[in-house]
Image: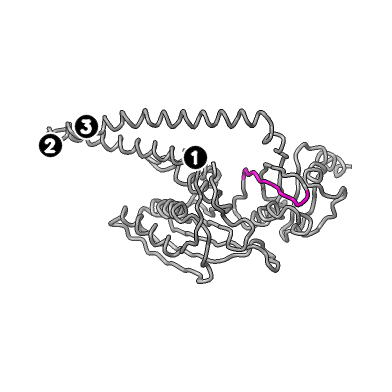
C-alpha cells in the first residue's frame, strides 16, 4: 500500500527522474523522463546506463562521473542531439542516493525539458535583458575605474609631499592599497562577465603547470611549500585553450598556497582516466589535473558555495577566482570537483575531455 503511494508520487512529479546504482545501471525512470528522452513505456530495470541512454551519451557521462565526485553538479544544462530527432535542451541537477546507514547507493538525476523556454519569446527577452545588464555593468565599471584612478594618483602625489613619520603617510598608503584592491575586484568582475573566446590548441600540461607555479611562487618569496609533481607521459596532445587553462591552474595553485599560508606540501598530478568506472572499448577518457594541498581544508557549508561568484572566505578576497576557473573548465566541456574536510587539506580535480572524445573542445565563443 505504502509502496504504491510513493510510486504514484514518483510518477506524478512534473520533472523527469532517473536513478542509477553504484554499478552504473538504471534502476528507476518516471513517466516524464521517459517522455522527454523518448524511452519505451516500461523501461527495464538494471540495464546499463550506456545501453539505455545510447542516444544521449552526454547524460550518461555526467551521471557516471557523478559517482566519482564528492559534489555532483548542482545545476547544469545540456543540449541533446539524438540522430533523427529534433534538438532538445534539458536543465537539471544530480544528487547522491544514500541508504539508511548513510552509505551511497547510487545517483539520481532530476531534470526538465527547457526546449520551449529556450526557443520562446521569454528566453529572447531574457537574453536582451542580460545583454543590457552586461552593457550597464561595463559602463558602471568604467565609471568606477576612472575616479579610482584619480584617487590613487592624488594619494600618491600627496604622499610624495609628506616626509618623516607623518601619520598622513600611513593613511595615504592605506588609500592607495584600497584603490588597488577595488580596481582589481572591478577588473575580475569584468573578466567573469565577458564571454570566453575559446581557441583550443595542443597544450603541454606540465609546462603550463610550471608557469602557473612560477607565478604563484613569486607572490610568496618567503614561502616554504614542498611540491611533488607526477605527470603521466600518456597525457599528450590535449586540446585546450592554453591561456585560459593556465588561468585555471594559477587560481587553484594560488588558493592552495593561501590555504597553507605559504607553508606545507603540494602534490600535483596529471593522468588519463576513463570516463566511467566500467570503461568499454573506445569509450571516451579524460585528462585529469589533480592539485592536493595540506591546508586548513574546507567545511561542507563552504564547499557547497565554493564556485559561486563573489563568495569568499578570505579577507579582502573578491570571490571571483574559482568562479572564473569553473566557467573556463565548463567552456572546455570539462568538470571541476573538490574533496576536502575541515583541517585536512583539499584536493581539486579538473577533468578535460581527451582527444578522440566527442566532447573535446572546439574553437568557439562561450557566454
Q: Earlier in the sequence, mark 1 or mark 2?
A: 2
- Secondary structure of the residue carrying tag 1 is loop
Q: Is residue 120 magenta?
A: no
- Secondary structure of the residue carrying tag 3 is helix
Visible residue check, residue 38: yes
Name the mark nearer the viewer: 3 or 2: 3
Distance of label 3 from label 2 (alpha carbons): 16 Å
Question: Is 75 left, or right, of 22 in this rendering?
Answer: left
Q: Residue at x 67, y 47 (%)?
A: 94
Residue position for label 1: 309
Q: Quadrant of residue 157?
A: top left
Question: Is 93 left, or right, of 17 in this rendering?
Answer: left
Vertical side of 41 occupied by 194: above or below: above
- Secondary structure of the residue carrying tag 2 is loop
Determine crowd level at label 2: few under 14, some 14-19, many 20+ residues with C-alpha closer than 10 A.
Answer: few
Q: Report the magenta residues as a range.
A: 74-84
Q: Which mark is residue 155?
A: 3
Q: Is residue 83 magenta?
A: yes
Q: Which mark is residue 165?
A: 2
Instruction: Choose between 110 and 249: the one closer to the eye.
Output: 249
Name the mark nearer the viewer: 1 or 2: 1
Distance of label 3 from label 1 (alpha carbons): 31 Å
Q: Earlier in the sequence, mark 3 or mark 1?
A: 3
Contact between labelled residues 2 and 3, with CB atoms less than 8 Å apart: no
Residue at the left extreme, as displayed = 164
Amino acid at each position: 500500500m505504502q509502496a504504491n503511494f510513493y510510486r504514484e508520487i514518483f510518477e506524478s512529479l512534473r520533472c523527469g527522474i532517473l536513478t542509477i546504482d553504484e554499478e552504473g545501471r538504471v534502476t528507476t525512470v518516471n513517466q516524464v523522463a521517459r517522455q522527454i528522452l523518448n524511452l519505451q513505456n516500461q523501461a527495464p530495470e538494471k540495464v546499463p546506463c550506456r545501453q539505455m541512454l545510447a542516444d544521449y551519451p552526454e547524460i550518461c557521462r555526467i551521471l557516471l562521473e557523478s559517482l566519482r565526485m564528492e559534489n555532483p553538479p548542482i545545476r547544469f544544462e545540456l543540449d541533446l542531439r539524438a540522430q533523427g530527432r529534433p534538438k532538445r535542451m534539458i536543465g537539471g541537477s544530480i544528487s547522491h542516493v544514500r541508504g539508511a546507514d548513510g552509505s551511497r547507493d547510487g545517483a539520481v538525476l532530476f531534470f526538465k525539458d527547457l526546449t520551449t523556454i529556450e526557443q520562446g519569446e521569454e528566453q529572447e527577452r531574457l537574453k536582451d535583458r542580460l545583454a543590457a545588464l552586461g552593457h550597464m555593468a561595463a559602463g558602471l565599471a568604467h565609471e568606477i575605474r576612472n575616479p579610482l584612478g584619480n584617487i590613487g594618483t592624488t594619494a600618491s602625489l600627496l604622499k610624495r609631499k609628506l616626509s618623516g613619520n607623518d601619520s598622513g603617510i600611513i593613511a595615504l598608503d592605506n588609500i592607495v592599497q584600497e584603490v588597488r584592491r577595488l580596481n582589481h575586484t572591478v577588473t575580475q568582475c569584468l573578466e567573469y562577465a565577458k564571454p570566453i573566446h575559446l581557441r583550443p590548441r595542443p597544450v603541454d600540461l606540465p609546462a603550463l603547470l610550471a608557469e602557473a607555479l612560477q607565478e604563484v611562487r613569486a607572490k610568496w618569496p618567503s614561502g616554504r611549500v614542498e611540491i611533488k609533481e607526477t605527470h603521466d607521459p600518456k597525457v599528450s596532445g590535449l586540446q585546450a585553450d592554453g591561456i585560459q587553462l593556465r588561468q585555471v591552474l594559477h587560481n587553484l595553485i594560488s588558493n592552495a598556497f593561501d590555504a597553507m599560508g605559504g607553508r606545507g606540501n603540494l602534490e600535483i598530478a596529471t593522468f588519463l582516466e576513463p570516463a566511467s568506472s566500467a570503461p568499454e572499448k573506445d569509450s571516451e577518457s579524460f585528462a585529469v589535473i589533480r592539485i592536493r594541498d595540506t591546508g586548513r581544508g574546507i567545511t561542507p557549508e563552504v564547499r557547497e558555495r565554493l564556485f559561486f561568484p563573489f563568495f569568499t572566505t578570505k579577507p579582502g578576497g573578491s570571490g571571483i577566482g574559482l568562479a572564473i576557473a569553473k566557467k573556463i573548465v565548463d567552456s572546455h566541456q570539462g568538470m571541476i570537483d573538490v574533496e576536502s574536510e575541515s583541517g585536512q587539506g583539499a584536493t581539486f580535480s579538473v577533468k578535460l575531455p581527451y582527444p578522440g572524445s566527442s566532447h573535446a573542445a572546439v574553437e568557439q565563443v562561450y557566454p
